[in-house]
Amino acid sequence: MSRVLHKAASIALSYPESRAVLWGVLPEFESYLERTPLSVAQAHYVETFDMRKRCCLYLTYYTHGDTRRRGVALLKFRQAYQRAGLVVTDEELPDHLAVVLEFSAAGNYDAAMELLVAHRAGLELLWQALDGLGSPYASVVGAVRAALPRPGPADLAAARALAQEGPPVEMVGI
């Protein structure tokens, strides 16, 4: 079931190009797509994920911000994909949640779960932000969260700290 869930969530968290078929796995989100004109869904996607830092789909952004350390974190994603024999393109950053979920759906469940669990605090913050907005995407991220092991106290504390402080900032050349 997790492979199908991750495939459906990967489609749902990608820019909407057409009415996605999600096989009834994400019924709340599928209902949103059915009743929403494509242009409205596209505008909502951009407004939600491109205009709000707390709704970032790039998992390393939460823990590393736009710092130099983020490059090392991105490399870990690329290496996981390469170890699985996948060709990594520059079409999308490797830490994009939809890419990680597609990686899982392609048969790399354990490696993808390691990446998701390692970035659980960011995933928690993303879900909280989407839920707070009443976004239909909250149900998608919520389903991904539900498929992960329960968050521990450290995960929840890290999510609270991120919510209060935001991602790290690097002052270079000042």
Image: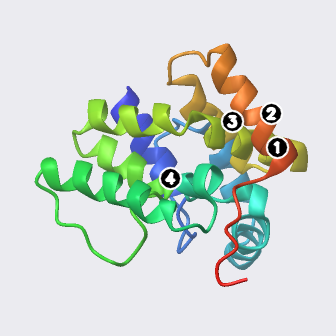
**Which of marks 4 and 2 precedes in the sequence?**
4
Residue 119 visible in the shown view? yes
Quadrant for residue 171, please give it.
bottom right
The CA span between labels 4 and 1 is 19 Å
Badge 4: few (under 14), some or many (20 or more) residues near its Cα, within 10 Å?
many
Residue designated by label 2 = 160
Badge 1: few (under 14), some or many (20 or more) residues near its Cα, within 10 Å?
some
As shown in the figure, which amino acid type bears the numbered disc 2?
A: Arg
Judged from the image, the secondary structure of the residue bearing numbered disc 2 is helix
Residue designated by label 3 = 124
**Which of marks 1 and 3 precedes in the sequence?**
3
Up/down of 44 relative to 81, above or below: below
Rendered residue at 74%/25% (across/down):
157
Judged from the image, the secondary structure of the residue bearing numbered disc 3 is helix
The CA span between labels 3 and 1 is 10 Å
Label 4 vs label 1, nearer the camera: 1
As drawn, the residue found furthest toward the left would be 85
Is residue 166 shown left or right of residue 49? right
As shown in the figure, which amino acid type bears the numbered disc 1?
A: Ala
As shown in the figure, which amino acid type bears the numbered disc 4?
A: Leu
The CA span between labels 4 and 3 is 13 Å
Q: Residue 82: x, y in percent? A: 17, 56
> Is label 4 in contact with label 1 (beta carbons under 8 Å)?
no
Residue designated by label 4 = 97
Q: Quadrant of the N terminus?
A: top left
The CA span between labels 1 and 2 is 5 Å
Badge 2: few (under 14), some or many (20 or more) residues near its Cα, within 10 Å?
some
Is residue 144 shown left or right of residue 38? left
Q: Residue 74: x, y in percent? A: 40, 60
Q: Nearer the viewer, residue 90 or 33?
A: 90
Is residue 113 shown left or right of residue 118? left
Q: Nearer the viewer, residue 128 or 135?
A: 128
